[in-house]
Image (cartoon, grey):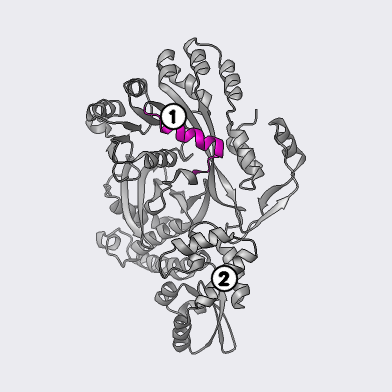
Amino acid sequence: MNDTRKRLGDLLVESGLISEEQLQVALVEKPKGQKLGDALLERGYITEQQLIEVLEFQLGIPHVSLYRFPFDQKLVKLVPKEMVKRNLLIPIKIEGDKLFVAMADPMDFYAIDDLRLLTGFQIETAIASKDDILRAINKYYEIDDSMSDIMSELNVQDDVQEEKITSEDSPVVRLVNQILQNAVQQKASDIHIDPQETKVLIRYRVDGVLKNERTFPKHMQSVLIARLKIMANLDITEHRVPQDGRIKMHIEFHPIDLRVSTLPTVYGEKIVMRILDLGSTLNDLNKLGFNSLNFKRFVKLIENPTGIVLITGPTGSGKSSTLYAALNHLNSEEVNIITIEDPVEYQLEGINQIQVNANVGMTFAKGLRSILRQDPNIIMVGEIRDRETADTSVRASLTGHLVLSTLHTNDSLGTITRLIDMGVEPFLVASSLTGVVAQRLVRKVCRDCATEQAPTKREIEIFAKRGLSIDKVVRGKGCGTCNMTGYKGRIAIHELLELNDEMKRVIMNNESFSKLRELAIKNKTIFLIDDGLLKVKQGLTTTEEILRVAVAE
């Protein structure tokens, strides 16, 4: 077996997918018993598709894409669900006395033997990616079971009974678990349960874009919503006012935290769940996609003992992830870090986190004043929403604290105007603010179907306007891995404004906005659009994505 493993690494190096150093890093750092392929996937050195192609060549076993594969429903009855899930395999077709099976690990001979004894067929294997197999299992084994069960039960009696929606093996419980599991597996950030006039839509937001996942008949609405409300400890008898709650659970051995919000609409209650995957928090500054100049400047900003560093951008632009990564970088036993958030998204070890609670009068401003009596070194304020919070934050930074916070503005320079509009005196803004990071998330080109193309005339113009040249762009054709979108995963683009003495003088004297902009350009500030276009040049994303979130002046 060792011999094969060695060959896999060599093959990957020979085909230019990884470097010798990456191979050595993975071999040294992987836990005992973990397969080399899995270790390389975890570190993001290769994609699952690339690994499958090399394995196909190494083992001589064909690979199969299960996306839109014509499945035979009779096969679902042939191999039990427990076996399929335990061994990550799925039967795909029968020819004569042969059963063809797609497996994530085609070298699992025990599973192949079990299958042969169970079905009486000769087993022929093919390789498929783990995600592909899990998606197929969810589609053909799970939902259809519970769907038909629920249908039959609901047709018998239409009232929502307590035990029907709480007992673990009732169909509605299985169905809801399935919806959640599916969302986590597709790496969705939000799940929307949308009641319509004649149906209920289940929609997932994947990589920032909403897509319809399933449609359920209208009469299933009440049980679905009742089940989710019970899980989130909400009042199931109250349908007229919005409610908020949380669900903590484990999906595929991963701790998942769901923030649940209900809203009464004309067709019933709409539920939106924000998924926080506690296992995969971005706690590493190096993984946030800063370009090298911005990275150096950002680390310098957050390592200042005093001052305010603001992170700005619209909702869902990854501001919290950047803040948490910064806190993680600063977290050590020599400093006292206190945060006040609404709500506390991720719990961080060694950091005191406070939750805002408007019902008892615990607002950002009030909490912040109390924090200042707790001898803090670093304070993180979830969001500056009003003048009082802004004033207190400014004064905290002037009395020798480092304050990190977020603000909803479009760009870094707009933040200064916004603070002054809020009523903070210009001289206070100038003396306290040390830097602003404006941030957006853009979708990354799927590595499995990325193809190089010549740039269009319009793209060449856009690049030339910013003083850049471009000779090739990378776009995804669309494949099973990325659900035919051509994009998989997201990356951040940043604009980092470091305030120097000249800029502070301009703010104090209330001079024009254009003067600030000139100074920012002189100080080699990389604007959002420029950072985006640089990432297009690196083949990480596309020009369309950048123009969707950043304005070309």
Q: Identify the residue at horizontal 63%, vertical 73% (top origin).
A: 57
Quarter where residue 532 is shown: top right
Say what secondary structure mark 1 lies in.
strand
Q: Please state which amino acid type lies under the numbered disc 1.
A: Leu
As drawn, 43 above or below 305:
below
Describe residue 543's horizontal placement relative to residue 33 as left or right. Answer: right
Most prominent secondary structure in the magenta stretch?
helix
Q: Rounded to the nearest whole Å, what is the CA distance between mark 1 and mark 2?
A: 46 Å
Foreground of the two, 243 or 434: 434
Q: Which residue is mark 1?
A: 310
Describe residue 442's horizontal placement relative to residue 81 as left or right. Answer: right
In the picture, the disc for residue 336 is none
> Which quarter shows the C terminus?
top right
Instruction: Pinpoint residue 552: horizontal percent, then vertical percent.
Output: 64, 31
Say what secondary structure mark 2 lies in.
helix
Q: Which residue is mark 2?
A: 8
Report if residue 429 is visible in the image. yes
Residue range in magenta is 288-305
As drawn, 542 above or below 109:
above
Foreground of the two, 399 or 212: 399
CB under 8 Å between discs 1 and 2: no
Q: Identify the residue at horizontal 41%, vertical 17% (top origin).
A: 431
As drawn, 392 above or below 487:
above
Please tell me whether residue 295 belongs to the stretch shown in magenta.
yes
How many neighbours does mark 2 have within 10 angstroms: few (below 14), some (14-19), or many (20 or more)? many
